[in-house]
Image (tube, coloured by chain):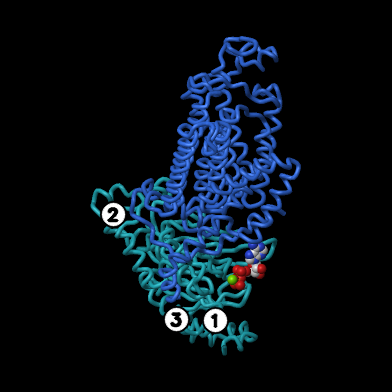
Chain colours: A blue, B cyan
Amino acid sequence: MMTQVLSKSPLSKPSLSRSSPSSQFWLARPFGERATQIFLGVLLAALLLVTVLHTVVPQGSPLHVNAYTVNLFGKYLSYALLAVAVDLVWGYLGILSLGHGAFFAIGGYAMGMYLMRQIGDRGTYGHPELPDFMVFLSWDSLPWYWQGFDMAWFAFAMVLLAPGLLALVFGFLAFRSRVTGVYLSIITQALTFALMLAFFRNEMSFGGNNGLTDFREILGFNLRSNDTRLGLFLATGVALALSYILCRAIVSSKLGRVCVATRDAEARTRFIGYRVERFQLFVFVVSAMIAGLAGALYVPQVGIINPSEFSPLFSIEIVLWVALGGRATLYGAVIGAILVNYAKTIFTGVMPDAWLFALGAMFVLVTIFLPKGVAGLLRKRRRAATSDNAGTQEAIV
Amino acid sequence: MSLLQSLKARDRVFDFMAPDASPVDVRHGPILYMEDVTVTFDGFKAINNLNLTIDDGELRCIIGPNGAGKTTMMDIITGKTRPTEGSVWFGSRHNLLNMNEPEIASLGIGRKFQKPTVFEALSVFENLELAMAADKRILPTLTARMTGEIKDRIDEVLQTIGLVSLRYQPAGILSHGQKQWLEIGMLLMQRPRLLLVDEPVAGMTEQEMERTAELLTGLAGKQSVVVVEHDMGFVRSIARKVTVLHQGSVLAEGSMDQVSNDPNVVEVYLGADDEEAA
Ligand SMILES: Nc1ncnc2c1ncn2[C@@H]1O[C@H](COP(=O)(O)OP(=O)(O)O)[C@@H](O)[C@H]1O
Ligand SMILES: [Mg+2]
């Protein structure tokens, strides 16, 4: 039922008048787009503002932003990054992934493994190499796949490569056999559910249901210090900006138009000579890597990664952020993720039990009154402002 | 394009050969050759011992009652349906039965489906851009830039299909007839050697029909065109040679006058008299 509602988001209604494809270098294109300029400007201003309010404004002042809030904002930004990844595949490629939480969690675990190994011999059991939970389970050596995670470069590469590899294998099998639509959504749910069950098991050596936690430092910086928190917040903001630019470059390239073509008429696109399944795979892998990056930035800020991030419900929630913010705009995904999670923070503080109802109500209201999400509202404004141009072109029709 | 650039472009040979991008060999006869083709769906012969030859540059009309197998015939040529028996050759060199759909498309066979499917969210210009013959692998597509040469080619096709003034409009707002032309334009962007057009004027207004007739007759000579059509008036207005299909095989072949006086054809079309009058 829900996937049906979601897949009916009115994307087929095309926007009026567009400009012609550009002759620029593909990575440079986003900088020429008005919407991207505004987005990057707002993001940069927000990062600066929070930094100033946190460091310069004295603690007693009502304008002061405390470390807890900075940390919270950092968490929102990592969710926003995750939402951008989902919008890339859902908005532009038409693949409703209900399993992106899995890529997020795997990126998070890769970071978590690095942070665990940074603890070194300072754990409760004081083992020089083994994390506490392994000592507790009486393991005598590190499993082979924990090797290398003491090196930052290796761990950070794994943050991208591990989710990317999973997406590559999964996507290869799914797209090659032309699994699409609701069926694909269902198997992405199955994927994340299966991984959740696997990561719950102690034998997997990812800490079972407790997950990985008690982190101390990242790249030598104390994770409990305010400066590190600010640094992580800023790093997440920069990662969001860079990923946003990459995604914009992809969707405004010819490849992006092939994606939209695939979304709206897959058989036709294949017939024109594009190997549709390879394009799907490419974008899916890029998206999974961005989701992994989001997870890796999330984990040091919340201080824990456990199998609940694999929960099928979480993956559905991500899709709701994007739907609420407005599909196929990228900035809509960012707005949706931040708004919903802000509302969640407030709501769970006041009435924790009512959160799911509130989320459901928000979704229903937006579907009815803002079918194109919050971004649709912004776009309408912008179009009204430039209606002179559109009006003349409409007159020709 | 400089010689060096054209050497690097691996999707085609040299630019001076570009109009002949398709490697099809027509020196020894027809561009399309179907021999004794049979297709069986659950025991039912949708195509039954079909023999058909299309010459290079020819404009051919295929007519026949509903269920005669016209669409199935196109499915076979484009690789969508595999025949149970028979052989299908493109020129004298390419056995189409050994190829898959994208391979056949890139060989220079373009097909317009009955129901127009254009990319509604993309502009008319972008629809043509995607359809263009180019390196369609991932990285070249990601880094592709719009060049003057490509623009000229798109403009040329926009002229041919009469959609110049709508170039930046999303294809979703086009009328039914305009979508049909855009789709033909998308085929032309691939510089096909053989165009297969399935019921192009169904649902069109009289004026749109006339425009389509002009368009198709204008194309013949530059490429071979096979038109499947129900509308007899339309067929009469464009046809040079007509093939009548019935129950999966050729019933008659010749000029429109020859065919419409053929007693077999008259018999099959007896119930279709009113359609002819329309
Ligand atoms: N995939 C299929 N499975 C079973 N029967 C089919 C299939 N495709 C076509 N047919 C049958 O083959 C016959 C010819 O169909 P078609 O080629 O669409 O006719 P036309 O285009 O001339 O109207 C019809 O009787 C149709 O029902
Ligand atoms: Mg038909």
CA separation in Å, label 2 and label 1 = 42 Å
* Residue type, mark 1 in image: Asp
Residue at position x 57%, y 30% from top?
Answer: A301
- Residue B153 horizontal side relative to residue B127, left or right: left
Q: Which mark is residue A26?
A: none
Q: Nearer the viewer, residue B134 or A6?
A: A6
Question: Where is residue B23, by image quadrant?
Answer: bottom left
Q: Nearer the viewer, residue A305 or B113?
A: A305
Which residue in the rendered view is the most extreme toward the front? Answer: A60
CA separation in Å, label 3 and label 1 = 11 Å
Question: Where is residue B17, by image quadrant?
Answer: bottom left
Residue at position x 52%, y 29% from top?
Answer: A229
Task: Report whether mark 3 lies on the same chain as mark 1.
Answer: yes
Q: Chain of mark 3?
A: B
Residue pointed to by mark 3: B238
Residue at position x 44%, y 72% from top?
Answer: A391
Q: Dot 1: within a 10 Å radius of its alpha carbon, few (fewer than 14), some, or many (20 or more) residues?
A: some
Residue pointed to by mark 1: B231
Q: Secondary structure at mark 3?
A: helix
Q: Measuring from the top left, give residue A363's x and y in whole percent.
A: 67, 53
**Image quarter in which the N terminus of chain A is found:** bottom right
Q: Which mark is residue B14?
A: 2
Quadrant field for ligand 1: bottom right
Asked whether mark 2 lies closer than 8 Å to ligand 2, one says: no
* Residue type, mark 3 in image: Ile
Q: Is residue A105 visible?
A: yes
Q: Nearer the viewer, residue B79 or A45?
A: A45
